[in-house]
Amino acid sequence: MISKQSITVAKWEFLRFFKWKQQLISYLIMLGVMGAVFAWSYFVDEGRQQYRIAVPAGLAIESTEQFQFQQPTISFAEQLQQLQADETWHAVLEPTSEQVIIHTKAGKKWQQQLQTVLQEYYRQQYAAEQGWTEAQLTKLQQPVRLEMRFLDDNYKGKDRPEKLIALAVLFMLLVGLSTAFGQLLMSITGEKQQRVTEQLYAIVTPQQWIDGKVLGHSLSALKAMFTTTLMMLLGFVVGVLIFANKPLQLDWLNFGVLAWLLPFALLGVVLCATFMAAIAASIDDPNTSGKGAVMMITWLPLLFTYLVIDSPTGWAMTLLSWLPVTSFAAMPVRLAMVELPWWQPALSLLLLVATLYWLRRVTGRIFLRGMQMYGKEPSWGDIMRWALSNKAD
Amino acid sequence: MQITVNDIQKSYATVQAVQGVSFQIRPGEIFALLGPNGAGKSSIIRMLVGMTRPDSGSISVQHGDEVFDHVPRRYLGYLPEDRGLYIDKSVEKNLRYLAQLHGLSATETEQQLEHWLAVFELTDRRKEELKQLSKGNQQKVQLIAAVIHRPALVILDEPFSGLDPINQEKVVQFLQRLRAEGMTVILSAHQMAMVEKLADHMLLMAKGKAVLAGTLSEIRTQAQPQPEVLIETERALTPAELELWLPDLDWQLTAPQRLTLKLSGSGQLSDCLQRLLPHCPLRAVTMQNPDLHQLYLNAMSQHQQQEPAV
């Protein structure tokens, strides 16, 4: 189905936008930015510092790792003076009959944590005064435990790690489609502006040409998706191992779901790139044309799927997962969150392949004529007429 | 490769680009399409290449035992009127890509690259990006792109445009080399001096119609049915003297000692000379062979006079 010429075009298109030095530098910059974010959040984390809190005599609150509660012998006014003058105290407490006033110099994030500790202390104090047991206090805080039970055995639950995979897939598809959008627009309109089209038309058929272009830019999109995933995983690993100082657990990765995600993502990118190529071929000047925005229609399946991600068994998600133009985004999400019989994703994939084949032919027809038009843009009527014609090379 | 074009017509919207044009191109010859802008040359070329189809009439391309309705891509080398390559890529990257698309192996590509870059004196500049080259050198790269796969037929739309006289001469040599190697060449051009040196047959077009066709001498006969002779005399002549001596001939005194004579039959020149010689000695007698440029202008002028006013 793919000719030798198409492979040559694909290789050319892929390498045309692949400058490995610049790519390496951009990845290093991305890693540097991620490292800086982690480092910054680590160094400004107020939770790791210790705070001295002056409390009145008789307030027998136990110190924690973060807060040291001390009962100074000096007067309250002197405590406030010290708070104002130096760093002897980070806060001074002033309990009254109705409230506890926390005196500090200025608002900081750790003060919320202090409030939580104090609320817990006073809650226990109050329970003791009332003669309540710990169990009674717990019951009061949570009178009844609510638990969701799903009768549909296929539903995996919305808070499972698979949802994270589904969201990651949507994000990666967005990265891939954005890459394909930019490159296809530049490549196709650039060739028209550089007048390369007639030269190439005399060598390859428009169908071979567009097949190669779509393949090359789909590969670029997949490369962008792959490298972004790699960067994010690297960031995740570094974050967990170094900054959070926790063991790395990857048991949430579901390789069965991943095996389905890949063909859907791959074919989805190719389908969208094919549509984008058809539109780009009808653009004369990307700076003045309004048709470039139409290429962004390919992002809609991602948005539609995201909006119903919390109802993976609903009719909307089911419909999206079967429609060939949206299934590449919806079926992976549905697969991640619902147990499906194997034939459902397989049939959906088959429909996607058939649609891709049909769209490829339509794009070939539009490309044939669009690439030969200089100086003016075809109308939507022209494009429809070309799409419905039967001449592709 | 032999091409027969029979009564083709092509219209775009309200413009009738080609109107009933017929011609034949023989294997291994250089065929020139001549005419002013908008004459229909590029429309004919696009139909030959297969980018468009004639509205009526037929094109027959015969190569060996095969017959096609346009030139198949595998036999075609093409320099389009709207031309360009990837200006941000080097000379060799551009040419390698096109050679690979033509199906050349890496070894064949390298051989052809070496050969043609040397022919056009671009070997030292092969690593440079196209945008760093002058227009003339970019044009040379385009020419190499058209022939790097050694096609059976080369179609060159305006191959001389953008070139200085020295490089135009190089293109002439290049085209002669292609013919010597057995390739059939179709070219369209405005540079009549170049075409005159090269073309075996030519077709002169105006407003979508064929005006003149044939070899240079055939075109000369068609465009100038009355040959002209320039007679230079030793002494000045007057119109009155010529009225007396040559009353029945078509002459014109362009200077006191220069007389132009239009010949309408055989023996007319010797008759004229016999009548003049007794009265004044002659310095020189020269047959006037107008160049292609002049023939072209004459034909265009005649065509415009024949065209009905709109």
Image (tube, coloured by chain):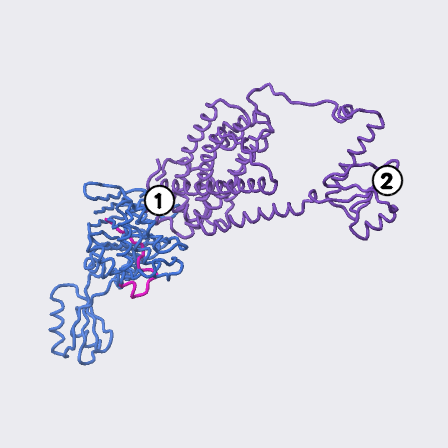
Q: Position of residue B191 (x, y in %)?
A: 29, 61
On the question of residue A294 being in view, the answer is no
Q: Quadrant of the N terminus of chain A?
A: top left
Q: Which residue is mark 2?
A: A57
Q: Are marks 1 and 2 on the same chain?
A: yes
Given residues A307 and B139, the one toward you in this image is A307
Q: Which residue is mark 1?
A: A8
Q: Colour of chain A?
A: purple
Q: Which residues are magenta?
A: B152-169
Is residue B56 shown left or right of residue A159? left
Q: Colour of chain B?
A: blue
Q: Position of residue A320 (x, y in %)?
A: 53, 29
Q: Quadrant of residue A110?
A: top right
Given residues A365 and B39, the one toward you in this image is A365
Q: Quadrant of the C terminus of chain A?
A: top left
Q: Amino acid at mark 2?
A: Ala
Which residue, as the protein is rendered here, is positioned at the far top? Answer: A151
Which secondary structure lies at badge 1?
Answer: helix
Q: Quadrant of residue A313?
A: top right
Up/down of B215 relative to B243, above or below: above
Is residue B302 shown left or right of residue A170? left
* Chain letter, disc 2 residue: A
Q: Nearer the viewer, mark 1 or mark 2?
A: 2
How many C-alpha atoms fall within 10 Å of the one at disc 2: few (<14), some, or many (≥20)? few
Q: Position of residue B76 (x, y in %)?
A: 27, 48
Sequence-wise, the earlier of marks 1 and 2 is 1
Q: Amino acid at mark 1?
A: Thr
Which residue, as the protein is rendered here, is positioned at the far bottom? Answer: B235
How many C-alpha atoms fall within 10 Å of the one at disc 1: few (<14), some, or many (≥20)? many
Is residue B159 shown left or right of residue B276? right
